[in-house]
């Protein structure tokens, strides 16, 4: 038997630079995310070893000739897949502890979200909405003061399809002439 999962022809994707005018850098441990970054024409940093190393890598290259920085944390996902609640909590707490490093960089826009939900009780990816935070000088502040799935669903951004995210990020960065029709 032969299983040709995902078998197709190669179709080049437009780069972040050609599509959005962004020069990007990808910081990710997991090979799939580095591969996607490469397909989008991003500079690929060597895989960091751990969450703190990822944040330190971002701090080290921030301010170079790039204006889009993608930092992926795999540990929150893999601990959910393993059904390891304590490890997932520890990974989220470590990200929380390291966020001041990002804020000290004073980014024009900061987007914090996930590519999917991985509840520990399911041990796999799920359909549940993921939290979304957008921080910028022009972001409207709502009543939500915690970052989790339930709070973010009640926030001003509500539940949105992921395909809206780049437009929102570009708008908050002042990179769009006009948003919407």
Image (cartoon, grey):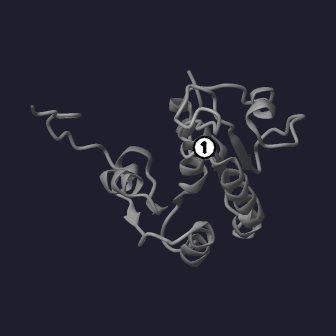
Please name the residue that numbered disc 1 is placed on. 83
- Give the residue at x 77% y 64%: 97
**Residue 140 location in percent, x, y?**
81, 38
Q: Nearer the viewer, residue 60 or 8?
A: 8
- Give the residue at x 41% y 53%: 33
- Left/right of residue 162 with respect to residue 32 in the rendered view: right
Crowd around label 1: few <14 · some 14–19 · many ≥20 (10 Å) = some
**Residue 32 location in percent, x, y?**
37, 52
| Furthest residue in direction top, as rendered | 181
**Residue 118 location in percent, x, y?**
58, 38
Quadrant of the image occupied by residue 147: top right
Residue 177 visible here = no
Quadrant of the image occupied by residue 4: top left
Q: Nearer the viewer, residue 145 or 22?
A: 145
- Left/right of residue 179 with respect to residue 45 in the rendered view: right
- Give the residue at x 78% y 30%: 150
Is 29 above or below relative to 61?
above
Is 56 above or below relative to 102?
below
Quarter of the N terminus within the rendering: top left
């Amino acid at each position: 038997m032969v299983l040709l999962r995902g078998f197709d022809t190669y179709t080049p994707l437009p780069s972040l630079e050609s599509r959005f005018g962004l020069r990007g850098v990808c910081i990710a441990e997991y090979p799939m995310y580095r591969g996607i970054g490469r397909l989008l024409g991003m500079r690929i940093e060597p895989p960091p070893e751990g969450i703190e190393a990822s944040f330190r890598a971002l701090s080290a290259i921030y301010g170079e000739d790039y204006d889009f920085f993608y930092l992926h944390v795999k540990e929150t996902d893999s601990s959910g897949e393993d059904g390891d609640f304590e490890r997932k909590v520890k990974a989220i707490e470590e990200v929380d502890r390291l966020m001041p490093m990002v804020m000290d960089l004073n980014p024009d826009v900061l987007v914090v979200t996930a590519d999917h939900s991985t509840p520990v009780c399911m041990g796999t990816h799920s359909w549940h909405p993921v939290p979304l935070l957008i921080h910028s000088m022009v972001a409207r502040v709502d009543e939500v003061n915690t970052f989790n799935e339930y709070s973010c669903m009640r926030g001003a951004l509500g539940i949105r399809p992921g395909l809206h995210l780049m437009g929102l990020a570009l708008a908050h960065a002042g990179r769009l002439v006009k948003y919407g029709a």
